[in-house]
Image: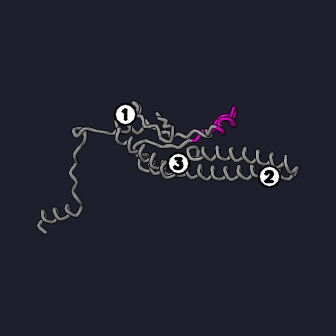
């Protein structure tokens, strides 16, 4: 069983035609598949591409609110103003995570639907498309999250060699086939009745 991994890089699926695809997918079929996957990115892109500005905006708001609450606390002496900062941080984090998971779910469902549609037609030829998501390791995951890397998405194209073997051994030349003419039973009755003179 062979497979080819198409990674999602910079908002596009990897469109390099490799030698592993020879004999399974033509270059035009592969480009059509990549075009289909990239058109899905236009409809619902992964959250990493859209939410980088949100992340920097949220951190900027946190810094601004921290500075304002420190200035107000310094001049008024009110301790309640300091409680605003954690409340805003929690509220904005909850909104961000809700938007992130909604966009992530929408993207993953869209790509899985496309893979299912491709599998409906390509399974007959021994080709299977599978969508995978790899979570980052726990080391430095907070730093990677701040940089915008949460998950790595890729589509695996798996080729079943059994299909090619069946196709190779299932072809016969015309000389090897025995040609037996088919005569329907009703025609045989009429032939027998005309032969007997009935």
- Please indicate whether residue 176 sits to the left or right of residue 117 in the image: left
Camera-nearest residue between 186 and 151? 151
Q: Is 97 colored magenta in this rendering?
A: no
Whether 186 is drawn above or below 67: the answer is below
User: Where does the magenta region start and end?
Assistant: 133-146
Marks 1/2: CA distance? Answer: 61 Å
Reading the image, the residue beneath label 3 is 45
Circle nearer the viewer, 3 or 2: 2
Task: Please state if 193 lies on the left or on the right of 56 as rendered.
Answer: left
- The numbered mark, 1 or 3, whose residue comes first in the sequence reads 1
Residue 84 shows which numbered tag?
Answer: 2
Residue toward you, 18 or 173:
18
Residue at image position (38%, 45%) is 32
Which residue, as the protein is rendered here, is positioned at the far front?
75
Would residue 112 be visible to someone looking at this image?
no
Q: Decide which of 66, 141 is in the foreground and name it.
A: 66
Give the mark toward the camera: 1 or 2.
Answer: 2
Q: Which residue is mark 1?
A: 22
Numbered disc total: 3
Residue 174 can be seen in this image: yes
Q: Say what secondary structure mark 2 lies in.
A: helix
Identified at 22% across, 64% down, the residue is 186
Q: Are marks 1 and 2 in contact (CB under 8 Å)?
A: no
Please tell me whether mark 1 sits on a helix, a strand or a loop: loop
Residue 128's place in the image compared with 1, above or below, is: below
187 or 52: nearer the viewer: 52
Horizontal and vertical percent position of residue 184: 23, 59
Q: Is residue 145 magenta?
A: yes
Percent position of residue 40, x then y: 47, 50
How far, Cα to Cα, is label 3 from label 2? 34 Å
């Amino acid at each position: 069983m062979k497979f080819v991994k198409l990674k999602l890089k910079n908002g596009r699926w990897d469109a390099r035609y490799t030698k592993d695809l020879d004999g399974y997918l033509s270059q035009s079929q592969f480009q059509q598949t990549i075009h289909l996957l990239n058109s899905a990115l236009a409809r619902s892109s992964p959250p990493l591409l859209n939410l980088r500005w949100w992340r920097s905006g949220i951190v900027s708001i946190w810094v601004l609110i921290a500075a304002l609450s420190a200035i107000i606390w310094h001049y008024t002496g009110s301790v309640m103003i300091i409680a605003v900062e954690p409340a805003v941080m929690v509220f904005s984090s909850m909104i961000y995570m809700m938007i992130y998971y909604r966009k992530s779910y929408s993207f993953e469902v869209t790509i899985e639907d496309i893979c299912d549609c491709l599998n409906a037609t390509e399974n007959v030829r021994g080709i299977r498309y599978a969508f995978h998501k790899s979570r980052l390791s726990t080391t430095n995951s907070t730093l990677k999250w701040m940089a915008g890397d949460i998950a790595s998405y890729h589509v695996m194209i798996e080729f079943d060699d059994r299909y090619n073997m069946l196709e190779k051994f299932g072809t016969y030349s015309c000389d090897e086939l025995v040609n037996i003419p088919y005569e329907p039973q009703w025609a045989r009755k009429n032939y027998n009745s005309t032969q007997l003179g009935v």
